[in-house]
Every structure is written in structure tokens, then in C-alpha cells.
Amino acid sequence: EAMMRLARRAEEVINPLYHPDGLNLGMNLGEAAGAGVEQHIHLHVLPRWKGDANFMSTVGHTRIIPEALDETFAKPKANFAQL
């Protein structure tokens, strides 16, 4: 339940910042799934737009959000603090 509340909060932060057409939610559980630590779970909340494609960075050598990573980190961080 707590992770779903956090996902909803992430939606409230991401939508006004990036105006995506939708969001992808993904969970990783356990070391083999990419969590890195046995019995650890984490959640990804990613903005998506019509026409974007998976693996853009790997295949297309481009980024979906054209901004510096520091800025991408700072914007939602400030908005999370306000909620």
C-alpha cells in the first residue's frame, strides 16, 4: 500500500513538470531482477509520451527529456518536498 501511495505522489509531481501522456510503473524485486540486494524492492515511475519508444538512449542514441540530469533530479525533488 505504501508503494502505491508513493507512486500516486510521484504522479502528482511528474505530471505538472513534464506533462506526459502517461506513466510507466515498474517494480524490481530481488537481486536477479535488478534490485541489487536480495529481498529489496524498488519502484520506477517514468513519464511517457505518444510516439516515444523504449530504449531510446540505447538504440536511438538520444534522450527523451532534453535537460541536464542535475536539473531532472532537482525539479521533482523540490516538488516532493512541497507535498
Image (cartoon, rainbow, N blue to C red):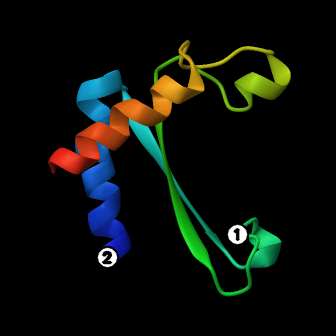
SS class of the residue under badge 2?
Answer: helix
Kindly tell me whether residue 48 is visible in this rendering: no
Asked whether 75 or 27 is in front, the reply is 75
Q: Which class describes the residues within 10 Å of circle 1: few (<14), some (14-19), or many (20+)?
A: some
Identify the disc placed on residue 2.
2
Q: Is residue 70 left or right of residue 13?
A: right
The residue shown at (23%, 49%) is 81
Tell me the residue at 55%/67% (across/down). 42
25 lies left or right of 76 = right
Q: Amino acid at mark 1?
A: Ala
Q: CA distance from mark 1 to mark 2?
A: 18 Å
Residue 73: percent from the left, percent from the top? 47, 35
Q: Quadrant of the N terminus?
A: bottom left
**7 in relation to 74, above or below:** below
Rendered image: mark on residue 6: none
Up-down relation of residue 18 to residue 13 (above or below):
above
Q: Position of residue 38 (x, y in %)?
A: 74, 85
Q: Amino acid at mark 2?
A: Ala
Disc 1 marks which residue?
35
Instruction: Answer with mark 1 or mark 2, whichever residue precedes in sequence.
Output: 2
Residue at image position (82%, 74%) is 32
Residue drawn at (47%, 20%) of the image: 50
Query: Dot 1: what SS?
Result: loop
